[in-house]
Amino acid sequence: MSPDVDLTLSKRGRHALRNRLLALDSRLFEFAAEQNWPYAERVLPRLSRSANHGVLWFATAAAMAASRTPRGRRAAVRGIASLSLASLTINTLGKRSVRRPRPVLDPVPAIRQLKRQPITTSFPSGHAASAAAFATGVALESPAWGLAVAPVAWSVALSRVYTGVHFPSDVLAGAALGAGAAFAVRGMVPTRDRAVPPARPCTDVPALTEGDGLVVVANKGPGSSDRVHALLDLLPRAELVECEPDDTRAELHKAAERARVLGVCGGDGTVNAAAEVALLHGLPLAVLPGGTLNHFALDLGVEDERDLSRAVQRGEAVRVDVGRFTCDGQQGLFLNTCSLGVYPELVRERDRFEHRVGAWPAGVLAALRVLRSDRHPLHTEVAGRAHPLWMLFAGNGTYHRMGLAPARRLNLADGVLDVRVVHGGRRPALRLLAAAVAGPLTRSPAHAAVQVGRLHLSGVTPGALLAYDGEVTEVGGEVTLEKLPEALTVYRPLRGV
């Protein structure tokens, strides 16, 4: 579709500057039409068609995700999210705000022209916006992947002028909107480099050439096994001990007796056990994430085997705080969180049904059973007064809300417990939701928050469940939560140091 509109004619009046810019735009379009670049007539029209409806970028994202690296998967997701926001903006605002007709195709050789001409308005270019959004989103998360994607994105944007469906200014405006969409997505969900905690306080640890002196204990399982063997490819002189989950603690103690550095690969519960053994034997800890969530490793800044290998061989490490709970002579450590009330109840109920119906259905069923209960799972005394509570959460370090992303810790050695309480009352689901929405608010009718170095609870309901780093135990009576400042030494790459 080629509307018969001559944009090269300047009209007098208050829009003279705009008309001169449009005339310049048309001359640039005609200049591009006169060019004859080698192989471009075969490549660019096909590339332009492949980007219709984002097909090219979805295929690229699938290839990136297939690389099986966390950074590649995150970059793919961020690229698609940026593309989606850019497309939504272009289709709802951009195309309807400026009703600019498409260029006249007369100067463009027929061999370059697309078989199906677009019928939407010309400004801005949706293809250029999608290309720039995807490439920028990918680059913000992974510069290496961004470098690979950028030439393709640039070629797609160029193809829109070369095939005659857009003026240069359409492409420039679309690219600017696409890049802006990628940065907007980063504002809502920060990239990893903005969520990595500061590299402090640094400490001296041995630099292990090729991993000599590192003993890694790993649970047997597809996730842990694949990652720990990838680590051994980078650290061939390290020793690997694979064991069943029930034997993990015993194998950690054996490994600690002959290791210069104790390594562990597994989820947060396994890492918790390794931290306890490392503290007992006075060893630095090397953590390779191998579980489902890996909160501690990600908050620490260790994402994969390459991060850990670099830190171990360079001798880069920091000291981090450790949380501890004590009740009637029983005690335990937590690296992430410790909670009483609804959450431990949910974990117990979920475990009852998980082997029958699967993890997600069991979680839903557990939530329905616990939240419909009339009894409060936790009673405690504060300042001599009894208080029913739906939940008490204590984080080992301050958790920060970052846009729409889950809360993260930016400092693992801040010396405080981040305590959040959901008060008792009717409608527990509504109160828990209100507390989640309240987020950083220090006090609300349903929620309260405080940061302390130590918390003592008395009158805790006997048999109350306490969850710590994925493990669950029973407590009651007097419960104390406290910090062990900078107690644990952990390897991590020191970026920017």
Image (cartoon, rainbow, N blue to C red):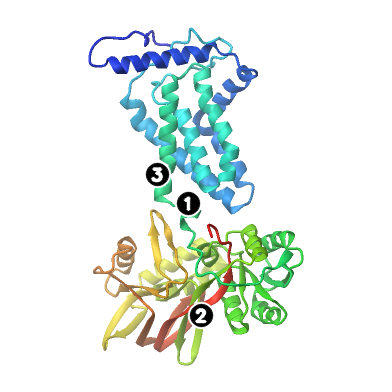
Q: What residue is shown with label 1?
A: 191
Up the image or down, 450 lies above or below 221; here it is: below
Determine whether, in the image, residue 205 is placed left or right of residue 364.
right
Element marked by disc 2: strand
Identify the mark nearer the N-term, 2 or 1.
Answer: 1
Q: CA distance from mark 2 to mark 1?
A: 30 Å
Q: CA distance from mark 1 to mark 3?
A: 11 Å
* Circle 2: residue type: Leu
Question: Could one spot residue 338 in this view of the protein?
Answer: yes
Q: Position of residue 401 (x, y in %)?
A: 38, 60
Q: Position of residue 186 (x, y in %)?
A: 43, 47
Up the image or down, 106 lies above or below 258; here it is: above
* Circle 1: residue type: Thr
Given contact means CB atoms under 8 Å apart, are the residues at marks 2 and 1 in contact? no
Up the image or down, 210 lies above or below 250; here it is: above
Q: What residue is shown with label 2?
A: 333
Determine whether, in the image, residue 326 is placed left or right of residue 224.
left
